Image (cartoon, grey):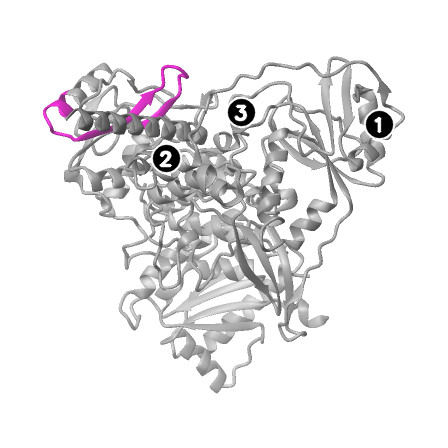
Amino acid sequence: MNKWYKMKHADMQKFVSALTEKWEVWVPYRIDGKWEFGIYDTGRDLDFPESVIHVSLKNLFFPKRRPIATYDENSKWSLKPVEPEGKPRIVIGLHPCDVAGIEYMDKVFLQSEHKDVMYASERKRTVLIGMLCSEMADNCHCTDRGLTPDATRGMDAAFARITDGYLLKGLTDKGKQVLRSEYLKKVDEVPDKKDWPAGRYVIASPEEFMEMYDDKIWHEMSDICLTCGICTYACPTCVCFLVTDENFKGKGERVTVWDSCQLQSYSRMAGGHNTRKTPASRVRNRTLDKFAYSHLRYGQISCTGCGRCVMVCPLKRSFPQLGARLTERIKDKKKGKSKSGARSKEA
Amino acid sequence: MKEMRKKIEELLKNGEIDVALGYRENPATGEVKADVFRKDETLDDMVFDERCVQNLVNYLPTLVARYKKVGIVLKGCDGRSLVTQLVEHRINKSQIVALGIGCEGVRLDGKEADKCGDCATNMTPIVDYEFGEKKQKKDPVFSKVKEIERMSPAERWKFFADYFARCERCYACRQICPSCYCEICVADQQEPKWIEPSAKLSANTMWHLIRAYHLAGRCADCGECERVCPQEIPMRLLNNALEKAVHELFGVRPGTVPEEVPPLVVLNKEDPDTILEGKNE
Amino acid sequence: MQVEKEPKILAILCKWCSYAGADLAGTSRFIYPANVRIVQVPCSGRVDPIMIFKAFVEGYDGVMVSGCHPGDCHYGTGNYHARRRIAVARRLLEFVGVHPDRMHFTWISAAEGKKFADVCSRFTDELKALSGTEKTLARKELAT
């Protein structure tokens, strides 16, 4: 049975406007040529990008700066936890790679030993209405990370663009409820199935990556890297944060702030010792975290193939390519080993 | 360009330099990036044209630590920034072979880079081998700085606050800057914590002010900070304002004269007290 | 509250001359406004411009720095360094929108208690005249 419904382009605008009555609606906006999620205000034209949105959704669930407790002079500096709050909200137009990023964050914040209350509340109040990509952008490589641009996994509802409107489909109860609308018409159409290109940045297995820990290649790779933190801030699965107190005039907040393993201060300890002083060690940490550590810890590598790290890199360096290059090196090494093994046999 | 490539090949071959730092073109994509050229490779993909925006001096300290002698391709602005590094004894001149090239301006996002309009010297002040045409020294105009200076204080703050608020504190500007090399950056200091780590207006303001101030009299206007900024904050404006101030106050243009000590590390008993007075009065 | 409208001034004074000058102003019973908060530093050469930036960001209306007269520095040359640094810091602050009248840099010797009192009164008056203009740079986070 066909579960896709059709909506005209003009109706989509009305449909989303109607949603704003009950919900806080987040849609992609184009600002200076870059796509970014923002709260929808009814007057604005609705448009969706064909492919990846430049700024990831991470900030909605795990904000750059989030107060977790407050204190002041009057209460003798005792900590008062900040209660999670917020209107129910809908995010419209996120892509399969965004969902994959959220799924990974779920594993970190919800399914591990310690549950993050704030994250859980942000997650609970959000309905995800995903959009199927109609093309792959220059840096997209989700097909190499076990996804496809038209996967609907993890979404509450999904939609796809067609020539004269949109095709929509509810996937969970939450999603189906949101989609109950007069503008939807039952049709026989289904979104086009496409053959997506793959194999741009195929990477080795986590175990193989772990073997590269002591390799010299990290120095080569960090030669031209700035070790600034922007790739980690743009990455939908980078979830490191710093807890710090910010005070002003007799009161203060304890906040979590994004942190980045690429910065020198990240691993500096009391007394000044730094476990990752060289750029090479920091580049290694991030690379292995994406392709190996995450798998060992959560059973899933934490690269979703969105390509945002390449888009934001000041030097336009390609992190996925770095992974591919490493993979080549791993292969070479293995060949070398088996060769030398063969030789030793002969001898 | 051909001569330079030949010269570098020759220097690599006869062992005068161990590696050469230059610009490599990726033939498949047409992108030009900084890269290291070694003895055993052809230099066919080494280029120098308007796409060579990067400042290569930032990569020197790591290379100098690893190799005895490094050749480096220098534009005018990179040369100025090399001068500032040599003056601060971060790099030893005996380890460097400077290959200066008469720069005709570089292009960014399809138009001539802003910094090229204010370029003081198109040829590096320190040079071992010179290629291309050397132009006359000229004084930068800083037209954008003057534009800001015509605004009222409140207007200026509005202009900058909008930009500062966007900062994500990725520190790409710090990392790319050849002159930003403190062992522990003031922004990373825990005690005292002058600059809060979170990305919010007050902390971002502190960061951008102190970054600009620490570069006063040292910044040679290579423009890398502004180029790499993912949020496109006009950091060159702050740098240029201080460049202009330092020239007006002490008559120094950082980087243009070899072995000129940065004005803020020396003292002059003859400085008039009037330099402490507000400019707008 | 009336008190809130009074401008707040941060005065960074060197230990040997200007702080002693402020001391003398006190012992000589010169009257000067209570708007001034004094920070003592060993030498005006110790004044890092980050202190001045921080003072504005934390909401001070004006910042005043004072050291020994040129030539009188207890450490020989600290105030010459300070003069250069502060001159540059001042240009930067003016450039991003701090009103020039919000900064005051001067030399006060240990014998000039009267000058200290005068400078404080004049600076306070100047800042009061600026009360209508925006206090740029001042932080808004946590400020309410």
Residue B248 lies, in percent from the top left, at: 38, 45
As shown in the figure, which amino acid type bears the numbered disc 1? Lys
Task: Provide the secondary structure element on which disc 1 rests.
Answer: helix
Give the quadrant of residue A325: top left
Asked if labels 1 and 3 touch by Cβ distance under 8 angstroms, the answer is no
Could one spot residue A31 in this view of the protein? no
Q: Are marks 3 and 2 on the same chain?
A: no
Quadrant of the drawing holding the C terminus of chain A: top left
**Residue behind mark 1:** A14
Nearest-to-viewer mark from 3 and 2: 3
- Residue depicted at x 63% and y 58%: A68
Residue A227 lies, in percent from the top left, at: 40, 41
Residue placed most toward the observer, C8 or A264: A264
Nearest-to-viewer mark from 1 and 2: 1
Q: Is residue C3 above or below residue A300?
A: below
| Span of residues in magenta | B10-34
Mark toward the start of the polypeptide (3 vs 1): 1
Residue A140 is tagged as 3
- Residue depicted at x 58% and y 31%: A54
Quadrant of the drawing holding the N terminus of chain A: top right
**Residue behind mark 2:** B222
As shown in the figure, which amino acid type bears the numbered disc 2? Cys
Task: Provide the secondary structure element on which disc 3 rests.
Answer: loop
Q: Are marks 3 and 1 on the same chain?
A: yes
The Cα atoms of the two marked residues, 3 and 2, are separated by: 32 Å
Q: Residues within 10 Å of mark 1 (few under 14, many from 20)?
A: few
- Residue depicted at x 57% and y 17%: A196
Residue A193 lies, in percent from the top left, at: 66, 15
Nearest-to-viewer mark from 3 and 1: 3
